[in-house]
Image (cartoon, helix red, strand yellow):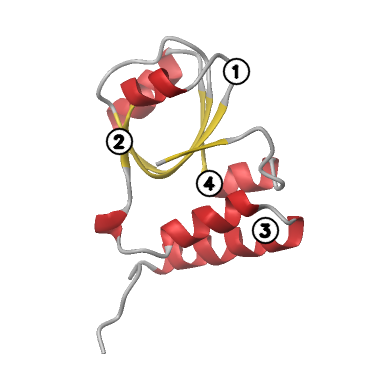
Amino acid sequence: MVKKGPENIQTRKLAANLEATGRKNKSGLWERVASILNKPSRSRCEVNLDRLDKITKEGDTAVVAGKILGNGALTHKLTIAYWKASASALEKIKASGSKAMTLAEMAEKNPKGSKTILVK
């Protein structure tokens, strides 16, 4: 039998914590993010900054259950939660005045997942 899903123990723990947070707070967002993280890494999304800029507005909160890449630029301030991010993406996020945090930090800050956009 072939094992499916993440091999990384930290990713498994993160997915379990997000799922527990979602169940405890009746938040479908964190349960959905946990199910995405439990998939193989080849099926997770990669999102460029220009796409984030295109689909969000000033002051939005976006959750990326994948990797943020540094292609493009942000023209407005956002709060972005990510699973992984490239160094160039983090530099550009901070240069635009936006906030970047990990999924675990965002789940602690906003356990209900209200007013949050899930980017795939």
Residue 103's disc number: 4
Residue highlighted by disc 1: 59
Left or right position of 112 against 38: right
Residue highlighted by disc 2: 86
Secondary structure type for disc 3 = helix
Q: Amino acid at mark 4?
A: Leu
Nearest to N terminus: mark 1 or mark 4:
1
Residue 31's disc number: none
Determine the CA span between mark 3 and mark 4.
12 Å
Q: Residue at x 40, y 19 (%)?
A: 53
Q: Quadrant of residue 59?
A: top right
- Answer yes or no: do the residues labelled 3 and 1 have beta carbons within 8 Å? no
- Quadrant (top left, top right, bottom left, bottom right) of the C terminus: top left
Determine the CA span between mark 1 and mark 4.
18 Å
Residue highlighted by disc 3: 21
Nearest to N terminus: mark 2 or mark 3:
3
- Answer yes or no: do the residues labelled 1 and 4 have beta carbons within 8 Å? no
Determine the CA span between mark 3 and mark 1.
24 Å
